[in-house]
Amino acid sequence: MSLTNKIDFAVIIGVKNANPNGDPLNGNRPRQNYDGLGEISDVAIKRKIRNRLQDLGQAIFVQSNDRSDDGQNSLSGRYKQFISSLDKGVKGDEVLLSKKLCENWLDVRSFGQVFAFSSKESKGISIGVRGPVSVQSAFSIEPIDIESIQITKSVNGEETEDGRKASDTMGMKHRVDKGFYVTYGSINTQLASKTDFSNEDAVLIKKSLSTLFENDESSARPAGSMWVEQVIWWEHDSAAGQYSSAKVHGSLTVEPDGVYTIKELEGLKYEECIK
């Protein structure tokens, strides 16, 4: 059964001495907008959600190559492998094929996906799936201070004629000393009915948001340097919802130190997921 009630959510993220989301077009410095606020792109957040869902044993279509669990290292390869197992009648029917794709992969029925891969099995059908789960980019509460440090490697990447250090041993690392970011999202029941996104799927999304940075350690984000301070989960009492997402998200106020307040909206219950 597909999702019955509209859901809105917010995630408060803490950062200490880490690079939340580097910008490859700016030397991998932490992303900032024109107001100096730190930013974590919606794509980066959905990548972490997919990783956590995969850790929870769910089938994921958009997998990182280093986390591939089906032997496929491309989206087209994963797509072709799946549809090759389907009955002939399903492969040529866009509606049935779309339904099977949503059934098989949780991220497809959550976020949607465009399947535009050439394949003899699917007879060249191009399918676009709109998912019910939307996630916004996260922004810091106040402008961030970025600290940059010079680093050196102890070994050359390539041999040099004189045996001295090569230029590639020098580099830079950038980090945010401290700060709190907030992202917002919602789950639409109308689109959920199209992909068969269920109440059980929503619970998995909530769980993945609460543990967003588990198994996400890296040189830029050492263990413990980023954490989920709180997940606020609003569940409406109807499919259309009692209030607009903008009004629900606007009821949350977060201070620069991570302390937050929630303005009560009549008849709308919420859950604070991090105890």
Image (spheres, rainbow, N blue to C red):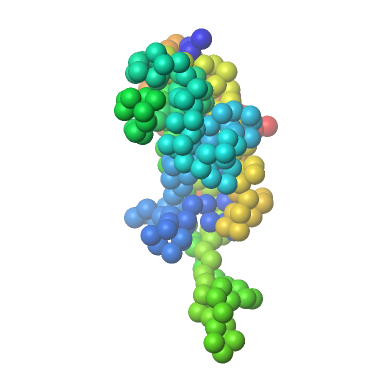
Q: Which of 10 and 111 is in front in this view?
A: 111
Residue at 36% from the left image edge and 28% from the top image edge: 120
* Residue closer to the observer: 52 or 253: 52
At x 56%, y 73%, the residue is 157
Query: Relative to 117, is 190 above or below?
Result: above
**Residue 249 x %, y %:** 44, 31
Residue 198, percent from left and from top = 52, 16
Quick check: 239 above or below 129?
Answer: above
**Residue at 60% in and 73% down:** 153
* Most distant residue in the bottom direction: 162
Give the quarter of the figure containing the C terminus: top right
Q: Between 66 and 134, which is closer to the camera in this rendering?
A: 66
Q: Nearer the viewer, residue 253 or 42?
A: 42
Q: Can residue 73 be seen in this view?
A: yes
Looking at the image, residue 81 lies above or below residue 152 = above
Instruction: Report x, y in % for residue 31.
Output: 43, 55
Please tell me in which quadrant of the rendered image residue 68 appears.
top right
Q: Residue at x 64, y 55 (%)?
A: 222
